[in-house]
Image (cartoon, rainbow, N blue to C red):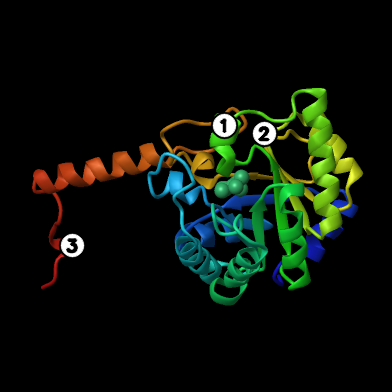
Amino acid sequence: MPKITIHDLLKKKREKKKISMLTAYDYPFAKIVDEAGIDGIIVGDSVGMVVQGLENTLPVTMDEMVYHTRIVSRAVRNAIVIGDLPFMSYQASIEDAVRNAGRFLKEAGASAVKIEGGAEVADRIRAMAKADIPVMAHIGLTPQSIHRMGGYKVQGKTEESAKRLLEHARVVEDAGAAFLLLEAIPMGLAKQITDEISIPTIGIGAGPYCDGQVLVLHDVVGLFERFLPKFAKQYVNLRSLALEAISRYREEVEGGLFPTEDQSFK
Ligand code: KIV
């Protein structure tokens, strides 16, 4: 199967076929996600919380994002890889945005980048698109704005804020975004946005009517123990499986049951 491109995702939207995405941050999991036939991998700055043990995503650096995106890209054959621009890699200037987005394609093997924000980053989206960098815009709950938003809260619940989000969606499409991530917004609003714009919408906590879905991998496989968002679904608990396996190993070492002669050299 050839590598999935933004054109394949657009075709899926037109044909009303659902798009599947997950995050990944390292080689072994990216390989599994890709083998499972997932369309797109977002190397999210959520790496800060689920891998680095940080309180939020703000401290994640551009160099760390390039490192994780590079090792994900190395594992992937089919899925489109999307690098996530971290806090302060695009806010200060359009030039920062283009240079840092370019690093994902030039140094890390990504085919697209994600940027948090709507109309306020439209000039960045336009400049990146002009530099031939496919962009996923991200509106609704944008975790890099937690201090302004006052926490991880559902967005677009009032008529006025819903109207504003719909306008943001139109503006980023007009600026040249290739797809749009909708995070933590009411499903009716996500449907309205999905129906109105021609680029694919990928939802996380945005209900079933988006063109596609994404979740944080560590939520799906049960490797993040701090909390499970209401919108996420855990399909397996790898943490308890790993804990059981590692505890058994410890018991066997302490009891003299491992290694046996089978694991030894003659
Ligand atoms: O950082 C992240 O993992 C995200 C997800 C919503 C894809 O932004």
Q: Is residue 89 left or right of residue 28?
A: right
Q: Amino acid at mark 1?
A: Tyr
Residue 151 image position (x, y, % from top left): 55, 30
Q: The C terminus appears in which quarter of the rendering?
A: bottom left
Instruction: Please state which amino acid type lies under the numbered disc 3.
Output: Asp
- Res 43 quadrant in image: bottom right
Tell me which residue sits at (41%, 49%) in the image.
51
Mark 1 to mark 2: distance in Å? 9 Å
Q: Amino acid at mark 2?
A: Ala
Q: Residue at 55% of width from left, 52% of height from top?
A: 44
Q: Residue furthest bottom?
A: 106
Residue 184, numbered label: 2
Instruction: State how far apart marks 1 and 3 are (Cα).
Output: 52 Å
Question: Is residue 159 rendered to the left or right of residue 232?
Answer: right
Asked if residue 215 is positioned above or below residue 88 in the image, the reply reads above
Q: Residue 155, image x and y in percent? A: 69, 30
Give the class, few, some or many, for how many residues have Cα within 10 Å of label 3's Cα (few <14, many ≥20). few
Q: Is residue 199 visible?
A: no
Q: Position of residue 226 (x, y in %)?
A: 42, 32
Q: Is residue 72 rendered to the left or right of residue 184?
A: left
Instruction: Report helix, strand or loop for mark 2.
Output: loop
- Mark 3 highlights which residue? 262
**Relative to 208, is 245 above or below?**
below
Q: Give the numbered dot on residue 152.
A: 1
Disc 1 + disc 2, Cβ < 8 Å: yes
Q: Is residue 43 above or below residue 161?
A: below
Q: Is mark 2 within 8 Å of ligand 1?
A: no
Quadrant where the N terminus is found in the figure: bottom right
Q: Residue at x 40, y 43 (%)?
A: 54
